[in-house]
Image (cartoon, rainbow, N blue to C red):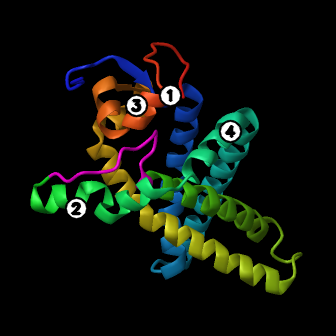
Amino acid sequence: MNHQHDMRPIQKHPLNVRVFHYLLLLSFLPLAATGLLLFFKPLTQEAMQLTYDIHIIAGVVMAADCVAFTLMAFDRVLLFTARVFSFGKSDLGWFKVLGGYPQKFLLGKKVAVPPMRKYNSGQKLFGACVLIGGTLLVFSGLVLWLMPHIAPREAVYLLGQVHLVAGLILTAFLPVHLFLAVYRFDDFKAMMLHGNVPYHDAAEYTPLWVEKEVVPVSGEKGC
């Protein structure tokens, strides 16, 4: 069946996920920018102190957002975790062609891509990095901020290195994530606005999710 013009809405991102994502985005962007400034130290001492203060405030917002969402929507956190850590042969096939994006952007050609569920393999890899890296960032950041003189010196040094590496990895992912989010504009609008993707978009990019899990909806229920 051709779903090319099927505009029925499918809810992909419910309200609580969108609010969490908003706060995560609004906190991580200044965290990434100030983190790079703190690493390279290109500014005056007064400007670096302001940079540090902004970094701390953004870090507290991100930590509070993550903790609150985990407590209030634990079932959704478990579902997301199960999705992003479910790798199989189709994911290997996806990575062999990198989702077909290089061929599309560089050569103007379309290649066969293994059918995906709710998240494609690249999104699952990014999601796994966010879960692991975000947890490490929050934990290490809180220790480095609240008890740098209480914790053992070796532990503080190790947590500092963990904080740095996790921050750099997630910051490196950020431009690609933002570019592909805007490229997949229907999904971008779903995450940033109303939560819904058109049936034709879901059927094209996430056919297994549509086939096995989705029922078109108009309310705040979804997968």
Q: Which residue is mark 3?
A: 190
Residue 213: which numbered mark, if any? 1
- Where is residue 182, by image quadrant? top left
Vertical relation: 141 (above or below) 61: below
Residue 91: which numbered mark, if any? none
Front tag of 3 and 2: 2
| Mark before the other along the chain sequence, 4 or 1 | 4
| Mark before the other along the chain sequence, 3 or 4 | 4
The region drawn magenta spans: 110-122
Q: Residues within 10 Å of mark 1 (few under 14, many from 20)?
A: few
Task: Measuring from the top left, give residue 87's x and y in whole percent.
Answer: 52, 56
Does 111 lie within the magenta span? yes
Q: CA distance from mark 2 to mark 1?
A: 29 Å
Residue type indicated by callout 3 = Ala
Q: Which residue is mark 4?
A: 69
The mark total stands at: 4
- Where is residue 193, by image quadrant? top left
Q: CA distance from mark 3 to mark 2?
A: 24 Å
Task: Measuring from the top left, give residue 181's x and y in whole percent.
Answer: 35, 46
| Mark before the other along the chain sequence, 4 or 2 | 4
Q: Kindly indicate whether the residue at mark 4 contacts the one at mark 3 (C-beta within 8 angstroms).
A: no
Q: Which residue is mark 2?
A: 102
Q: Residues within 10 Å of mark 2 (few under 14, many from 20)?
A: some
Magenta-drawn stretch, dominant element (helix, strand or loop) = loop
Residue type indicated by callout 4 = Phe
